[in-house]
Image: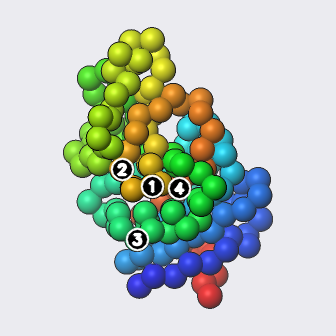
Amino acid sequence: LFQVNPSANKKNALLSSGFFATFDSFSYFFYSDVVTRQTAVNYCMKHHRNLLQNDASFNRSKVYAQSTSWFMDYSQAWIGVYMTATVRYWVSGGAVTYTNWSSGEPNGQPDNLYGNEFCAAMVLEDGTWADEPCDKLYPFICFDGLYNKHFSHI
């Protein structure tokens, strides 16, 4: 099951625009507003479940395909990985067991010594991940564990 709908519910609109897609009973919300990673986390936790997590339930190919078409003007989008120099975890607190780092990533360990690259973004060219400074501005993807009945579908 795959459905897409522009986000018409103003209560859930961040600033300008977004849409959601449902894949196999899970809802993903794509927001083109560019924000810091913490702003994205706060918004997702308030209005949905969390910032995108690539766990076992994540439909990588469909979410990636939707991201590349929705975020055409951007190179990356925030996902829910946070890291230190030695540990990587999801914003929900769980350990990261699946990774999809771009070649040479994460490359921020030396930068992390100075506090620069603690967050991860999905590279929209190929769906891999890159470590990034958390204060960069990117669009973002929120996740709900189950189909969100508060939105209408086409």
Q: Amino acid at mark 3?
A: Lys
Q: Position of residue 150 (x, y in %)?
A: 62, 74
Q: Which mark is residue 128?
A: 2
The answer to which image quadrant residue 152 occupies is bottom right
The 10 Å Cα crowd at callout 2, few under 14, some 14 to 19, many 20 or more, is some
Whole-number angstrom distance, CA of label 1 to CA of label 3: 14 Å
Residue 73 is tagged as none
Q: Tell me if residue 4 comes above or below residue 100 in the rendering.
A: below
Which type of secondary structure does the marked residue at label 1 adopt? loop
Which mark lies nearer to you, 4 or 2? 2
Measured Cα–Cα span from mark 4 to mark 2? 15 Å
Q: Give the labeled residue for mark 3.
A: 62
Location of the C terminus (image quadrant): bottom right
Closer to the chain start, of discs 4 and 3, is 3
Q: Earlier in the sequence, mark 3 or mark 2?
A: 3
**Left or right: where 50 falls relative to 36:** left
Q: CA distance from mark 1 to mark 4?
A: 16 Å
What is the three-letter code of the residue carrying label 1?
Answer: Glu
Q: Nearer the viewer, mark 1 or mark 4?
A: 1
Image position of 37 (left or right of 80): right
Residue type, numbered disc 4: Ile
Residue shown at the point (51%, 28%) measured from the top left: 133
